[in-house]
Amino acid sequence: MKQFEKSFTQQEAIPAQGIEGAVAILQSGRIHRYNTGPGELAETSLLEQEYAAYQEAKYCLAVTSGGQAMQIALRAAGLKPGDKILANAYTLAPVPGAIHACGGVPVFVEIGHDWLTDISDLRAKAETSGAKFFMLSHMRGHIADMDAIVAICEAFDITLIEDCAHTMGAKWQGRRSGNFGKVACFSTQTYKHMNSGEGGFLTTDDEELAARAVILSGSYMLYERHVAAPSEDVFRRIRLDTPNCSARLDNLRATILRAQLGQLDQNCARWNHRYQALENGLRHAPGVEIIERPQHEAYVGSSFQFHAHVTDIPALTASCGQRGVELKWFGGAEPVAFTSRYDSWQYFGDVDPLPQTLRTLSTTIDLRVPLTFSVEDCADIAEIIAEEAQRLAA
Ligand SMILES: *Cc1c(COP(=O)(O)O)cnc(C)c1O
């Protein structure tokens, strides 16, 4: 019987250029983004400029986490305490956390069996809730029908905020994920598509939102040191009515990220080879249901989901676990590690049940695909899951 030995949480080393850059920053002692010499552009400002170019967005702000990017995006977009906001009913905990921190009142939207936002539920809730914001998490990289989502947001005057923690580098019908809404948020926490330990980005084409975000991130009045930011006159309009919430990225992390950005597209392709190996190995496995990805979605396969149709899902995760394959089940009664859904966010008080989301998650299995796994490793993982699922197939 095959046994898998590698760690599901081991990422690749930081590229040599990033290590050299980090050592140089440490030797200079100038780690803070505004600690620059005359005429010097900080690594953080250069990173923002490069990420804006990559994302094809006008403005980019680097911050300390994806969660902070979301809080700042929501505030900069005008969310006020008590405002309703449409949101995913299952996503990583920093998303509801950001909504809660801003005083937003979530209206959760159902997902379908394919993990995509249920468009008819979105339309119904957009119409009846009166929410003027939609925080859309492209959860686990699955990108819903963006044409339909944008049309609904336009029809009901809803500001769309995209959480692209799992879609950095992905596209939908040729357009980068993150460029459909008013503002997009990204994470560079270790388990995402670029790794600075902690970190995040916000991108937008809206000059006032960008200026507010820079001030919110804690720029003091040093905003002119940002390159991927609007002009001085925009800052002058908003600078005194926008608070400083201190969430600046530092030059050390920025230099690590700059070294990774040039490899991002290549890494996305590497993820997809691994994803396809899993897909091919599991497509016809009894007890396993694969959802084929839509043609117009250029996804990044940094994680893999399937539905388990077995008699006992905990037994499946346990037996795969014994063979070294770490599976996460989104249907458990309690949140475990990174699994999180609306009924574990009790700080919002009682919310209407979402039966379709619960039904989908009750069979949803999730696994991480770090780039330290080879394509052959992924074929081995698929073989182990297929064998164990077959033993327990319903
Ligand atoms: C990782 C993640 C974030 C942001 O997380 P941070 O840990 O705050 O960087 C946001 N949304 C989703 C779906 C995520 O997975």
Image (spheres, rainbow, N blue to C red):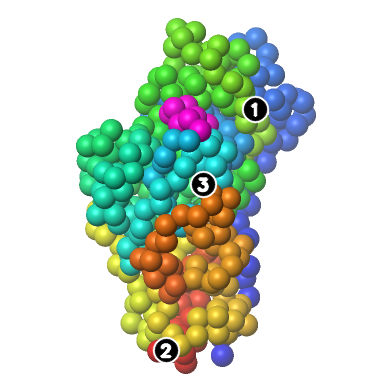
Q: Amino acid at mark 1?
A: Ser
Q: Amino acid at mark 3?
A: Val
- Ligand 1 under 8 Å from disc 2 Cβ: no
Name the front one of labels 3 and 2: 3
Indicate the amino acid at tag 2.
Ala
Give the residue at mark 3: 95
Circle 3: element type: helix
Distance in Å between CA atoms under marks 2 and 1: 51 Å
Is residue 245 toward the left or the right of residue 80 in the image? Answer: right
In the displayed structure, does residue 26 sit left or right of residue 204? right
Q: Quadrant of residue 322?
A: bottom right
Q: Please tell me whether residue 322 belongs to the stretch shown in magenta.
A: no
Quote the CA–CA distance across marks 3 and 1. 19 Å
Q: Position of residue 269 (x, y in %)?
A: 40, 55
Residue at the (41%, 48%) spot, across then down: 107
Q: Which residues are magenta?
A: 70-81
Relative to 261, residue 108 above or below: below
Residue 246 image label = 1
Asked whether the residues under the numbered discs 2 and 1 touch, taking CB atoms below 8 Å apart as contact, a structural biologist would say no
